Image (cartoon, rainbow, N blue to C red):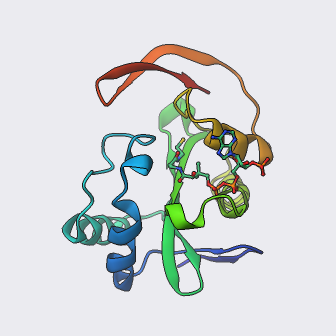
Amino acid sequence: MSIQLTLSTCAVRSWRTADVDSLARYADNRKIWINLRDAFPHPYTKRDAREYIRGVRLRLPETSFAIAVGEEAVGGVGFVLHQDVERVSAEIGYWLGEPFWGRGICTDALTAVTQHAIAAHGLTRIYAVPFAWNTASCRVLEKAGYVLEARLRRSAIKNDAITDQLQ
Ligand SMILES: CC(C)(COP(=O)(O)OP(=O)(O)OC[C@H]1O[C@@H](n2cnc3c(N)ncnc32)[C@H](O)[C@@H]1OP(=O)(O)O)[C@@H](O)C(=O)NCCC(=O)NCCS
């Protein structure tokens, strides 16, 4: 079952094999990489894009989606379902190609995928842990209805720097 959420600024849909070129184009950006987990490669090659899309298309349930403007995949949003007694919780993450920043696209996508994740997987909790410096991401979370719960002091290392995360 593939997903298609049509929103006012964008669509959230399943990744397609044909998205390899646009994924590599927009994901290959240090300003995006610096704000994400190290599993997100930098530089981001077409081979990385091909492997990523092949992987997400094999995985069920589907929890990683493209953010599309027109036909083009310009970002990604996805969640990780937790296990065992935390199976009612998930962590959400997202990124958007730089030319599309500041148009409310990520707020739209995050709001819709949050609702989808809660409904489709019976979640009682969904959260994100942006690095403390990531004001834009914190703002997006607030606009999508998320509430600041904690500052996780010195909880992560990115680009060789220890940083706080905001839950
Ligand atoms: C964070 C990101 C997803 C935002 O996407 P977006 O579509 O541009 O976000 P929106 O347009 O929906 O909203 C951005 C909000 O942040 C605000 N903002 C942007 N840069 C800011 C900054 N440096 N300081 C304060 N606020 C900022 C905008 O003004 C806007 O808020 P407003 O509507 O109240 O004016 C995008 O910048 C991105 O992909 N960044 C790199 C990857 C990343 O950080 N992912 C999240 C990891 S936790």
- Asked if one can make out residue 65 in the rendered structure from this viewpoint, the answer is no
Q: Quadrant of residue 5?
A: bottom right
Q: Residue at x 56, y 26 (%)?
A: 132
- Quarter occupied by residue 46: bottom left
**Which residue lies at the image location 49% right of the left edge and 63% below the top edge?**
97
Q: Residue at x 59, y 66 (%)?
A: 100
* Closer to the camera in the image, 116 or 72: 72
Q: Position of residue 93 (x, y in %)?
A: 53, 48
Does residue 46 appear to the left or right of 167 in the view shown?
left
Pick out the residue farthest to the top: 153
Q: Taking 60 as reference, is 11 above or below it?
A: below
Q: Considering only vertical position in the picture, is 147 above or below 143?
A: above
Residue 6 x/y as whole percent: 71, 78
Task: Report the residue that reaches farthest toward the left.
Answer: 47
Where is 94 relative to 148, above or below? below
Q: Residue furthest front?
A: 99
| Residue shown at the point (41%, 66%) measured from the top left | 26
Q: How many tags in the picture?
A: 0
Return the x and y of residue 33 as percentages of the image width and height: 38, 47
